Image (cartoon, rainbow, N blue to C red):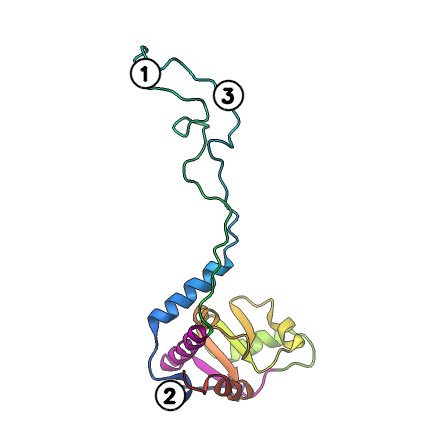
């Protein structure tokens, strides 16, 4: 694509002047925790099938004092302190998530990992055209395309490409930015990003 260009500088008034790495780490941990299904489950002593009869008398045998076959010490017994289904999700303040996204954007600019294209649209869904667009960027790695608005045709064109993701300005977050090597924005999405993040803290 002839009109591809790199954006190597960011407006400090929009994206700030410092990458907040600790905040980025906290945001990524939250997004990853929210993706956990939390369905791991083990059987405790009370859940294992087996007799509750005492295996042998308490004293006089010279052997360890036994319980029953569900004892966690025994093979086939219950699991001590094993995982149970739980919800790992939690939420950070919206202001913190917004600042984390700004820092992630700033880091992309500082690392010279931002491409700008005039627009992102197709007449009909075409994975072939989407792949050609990715190849025209002239580099290898993972890519995050940011469109100003959701376009079903564009989404269907990109959905089968490996290590290529598509999102909108409103849905953009720090996790999506950091998991992709390169950021690809359109002229319209750049303006919307400045509107979204250009109001200070």
Which residue corresponds to mark 2?
Answer: 12
Tell me the quarter of the picture where residue 56 sits.
Answer: top left
Q: Residues within 10 Å of mark 3 (few under 14, many from 20)?
A: few
Q: Is residue 194 visible?
A: yes
Q: Residue at x 60, y 68 (%)?
A: 159
Mark 2 → mark 1, Cα distance in angstroms: 74 Å
First in sequence: mark 3 or mark 2? 2
Q: Is residue 127 visible?
A: no
**Residue 51 — which label?**
3
Q: Residue at x 53, y 53 (%)?
A: 37
Under tag 3, what secondary structure? loop
**Residue 183 — which label?**
none
Which residue corresponds to mark 1?
Answer: 63
First in sequence: mark 1 or mark 3? 3
> For the magenta stretch, what is the residue range?
95-120
> Magenta region, mostly helix, strand or loop?
helix
Q: Residue at x 41, y 30 (%)?
A: 72
Residue 31 at what x, y percent from top left?
47, 64
Residue 127 at what x, y percent from top left?
63, 72
Tell me the quarter of the picture where residue 109 sits.
Answer: bottom left
The answer to whether mark 1 and mark 3 are in CB contact below 8 A is no
């Amino acid at each position: 694509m002839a009109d591809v260009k790199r954006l190597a500088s960011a407006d400090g008034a929009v994206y700030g002047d410092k990458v907040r790495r600790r905040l980025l780490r906290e945001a990524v941990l939250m997004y990853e925790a929210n993706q956990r299904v939390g369905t791991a489950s083990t059987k405790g002593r009370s859940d294992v099938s087996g007799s509750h009869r005492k295996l042998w008398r308490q004293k006089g045998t010279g052997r360890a004092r036994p319980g029953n076959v569900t004892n966690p010490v025994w093979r086939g017994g219950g699991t001590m302190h094993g995982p149970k289904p739980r919800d790992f999700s939690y939420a950070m303040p919206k202001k913190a998530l917004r600042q984390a996204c700004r820092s992630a954007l700033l880091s992309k600019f500082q690392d010279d990992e931002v491409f700008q294209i005039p627009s992102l649209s197709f007449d009909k869904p075409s994975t072939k055209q989407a792949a050609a667009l990715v190849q025209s960027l002239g580099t290898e790695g993972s890519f995050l395309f940011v469109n100003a608005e959701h376009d079903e045709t564009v989404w269907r064109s990109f959905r089968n490409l490996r290590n290529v993701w598509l999102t909108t300005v409103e849905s953009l977050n720090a996790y999506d930015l950091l998991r992709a090597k390169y950021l690809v924005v359109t002229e319209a999405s750049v303006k919307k990003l400045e509107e979204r993040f250009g109001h200070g803290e």
